[in-house]
Image (cartoon, rainbow, N blue to C red):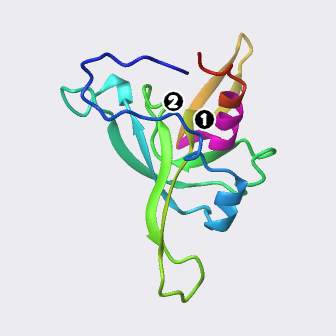
Amino acid sequence: MRINLPSDADIQQVFPSTLMLADDKFLTDRKIHPGDEVRILGYPYGFEANDAGFPVLRSGRIASFPLTPTSKVQTFLLDFQVFRGNSGGPVYILERRALNDGDLTTVNVYQILGLVSEEATLNEPVSTLDENSVIRHQLGLGVVVQAQAIKEAIDLLPPPN
């Protein structure tokens, strides 16, 4: 989880923090719900956005309910086509929204909601007289591990030297 960047890396220093990882309070207070559009960074089939190696930015919509409590709902579904190379990519929300119906005032909503862990598939068992097999059907859905679980995993790491 901790890495040393090359001294010639042309990026701003990132300070380690779990403050950007969404928890139940964020999901509830900001009214995050199915249908909300989110963004996903990844490398579909290892494809890079440019020669510098940046990931591809894609989008999708939250496709399952409920999202909380994250202690019980540890994953959610995302409506976007998953490819090898998307796994581990961050899923985040970034938008302006009114928190109450009819409000003219909006707030910035931005937080990491989780990471892509796998493609959701429907497995169909097929039996013949001679063999049993399973046909996997792609559903165009990603499984996202909730950010709260990521925070809990980070909290288990020993402190930095």
In front: 83, or 123?
Answer: 83
From this view, report whether residue 144 is shown above or below residue 124: below
In front: 45, or 11?
Answer: 11
- Element assignment for label 1: strand
Q: Is residue 144 magenta?
A: yes
The x, y position of residue 143, in whole percent, is 60, 39
**Residue at the spot of label 1:** 121
If you read the primary sequence from the N terminus, does the residue marked by circle 1 or circle 2 appear first? Answer: 2
Residue at coordinates 43% horizontally, 44% vertically from top-left?
40
Residue found at the far front of this picture: 161
Residue at coordinates 32% horizontally, 35% vertically from top-left?
12
Q: Amino acid at mark 1?
A: Thr
Quarter of the image holding residue 57? top left
**Magenta segment, which residues?**
141-153
Q: Amino acid at mark 2?
A: Gly
Dot 2, crowdedness within 10 Å: few (<14), some or many (≥20)? some
**Residue at the spot of label 2:** 88
The x, y position of residue 125, in whole percent, is 71, 27
**Residue 124 visible in the picture:** no
